[in-house]
Image (cartoon, rainbow, N blue to C red):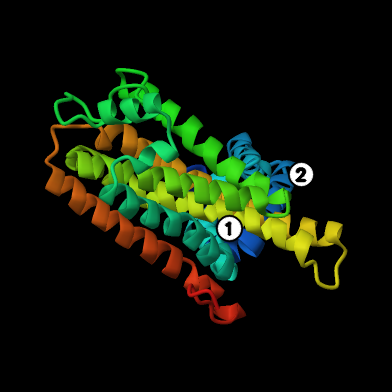
Amino acid sequence: MRQQQFEQEQAEIWARYRELLGQLESGKPLPPSAQVQGFPRLLRTISGHYALARSRGYSPGLAGELHQLVRRGYRQLYRVRPVWPRQIVRFAVAGFPRALRRHAGLFWLAFALFFGPMLAMGLACYHDGTLIHSLLDGSAVSDLETMYDPTNDRFGEGAIRKSDTDVAMFGYYIMNNVGIAFRTFASGLVFGLGSLFLLAFNGLYIGAAAGHLTQLGHGQPFWSFVSGHGPYELTAIAISGAAGLLLAKALLAPGRLTRAAALRANAAEAVILVTGAMLMLLLAAAVEAFWSASTAIAPPVKYGVGAIGWVLVIAYLGLAGRGAASATGPERFDGA
């Protein structure tokens, strides 16, 4: 077969191959049919055409062009593509909220153990300004009052805000909040007692601070500071508590499994919950460092952003991933 006839007969195949190869090299995803069959089969075909061009003595230009097409194709077919960005997105969009809904009962239990003491202590300290001293010593109360003094140039200044730079405080908030969440999770191994204690204690502490500062007249600095990051941070702590209670459930009620087998099974689910909580705490730390502490933003704006944050959290945890879960049956975020 003459070279000209050979090129004419294979022109359509080469054009299709170049199109798919260009998509791969530009980073565009191929359609599933092309990934599974189209491109690998075309690459084998082009490799055969290259071998024919050499064996039949076609022009060096054609053989060289086919050789380059084959080399480029093999580089795309066998290169290692990073999958972790896609996995993180899939986890955040569907895996995490679906896992939380699978264990909604434990989440609502942790939620009540955290927010219940918070609300009760907040109301009590608001009506009795001395009650906070039953939980905190005088030095800690003084630091708290200094932090949210309305005369401060920046909210949160004092013992907690240890740096003048927002970036440094971002790192501090990550370490502090993630540490609280991880301890709340890991202490579930003590038959759940550690998780129960830390949920209740942190709820009491936050409630005491809120009630005391509000009755002292420092309410606006405090509430405008916590409103922005509170939806993500407080929900994440409750989720970490639910992850700890999931570990405790394996030890206290393993069912037909041995405790070790139940713990392995529940730990896999608990890690999903606590990992999602950590991502929420990263978001909370960013908001806390770069938004919450600013006095240039009017309190009503901060309250509005905080309210939107709660709506987003509820919608995300209740609705995200439901389409992907429809094949396995309905999910409910109501403790059922």
Q: Are marks 2 and 1 in contact (CB under 8 Å)?
A: no
Query: Residue 294's quadrant in the figure?
Result: top left
Marks 2 and 1: which is nearer the front?
1
Identity of the residue drawn at 34% across and 24% down: 161
Quadrant the N terminus occupies: bottom right
How far apart are the alpha carbons under marks 2 and 1? 69 Å
- Crowd class of label 1 (few under 14; some 14 to 19; many from 20; radius 10 Å): many
Quadrant the C terminus occupies: bottom right
Residue 237, compared with residue 148, is above or below; it is: below
Badge 1 amino acid: Ala
Q: Position of residue 117 (x, y in %)?
A: 44, 55
Query: Residue 315's quadrant in the figure?
Result: bottom left
Q: Nearer the viewer, residue 312 or 114?
A: 114
Q: Give the residue number, with chain letter if any, for mark 2.
A: 55
Q: Position of residue 23 (x, y in %)?
A: 48, 50
Q: Give the residue number, with chain letter if any, for mark 1.
A: 242
Provide the secondary structure element on which disc 1 rests: helix
Badge 2 amino acid: Ser
Residue 289, compared with residue 53, is above or below; it is: above
Q: Position of residue 173 (x, y in %)?
A: 42, 32
Query: Residue 320's mark?
Result: none
First in residue order: circle 2 vs circle 1: 2
Q: Is residue 227 left or right of residue 322?
A: left
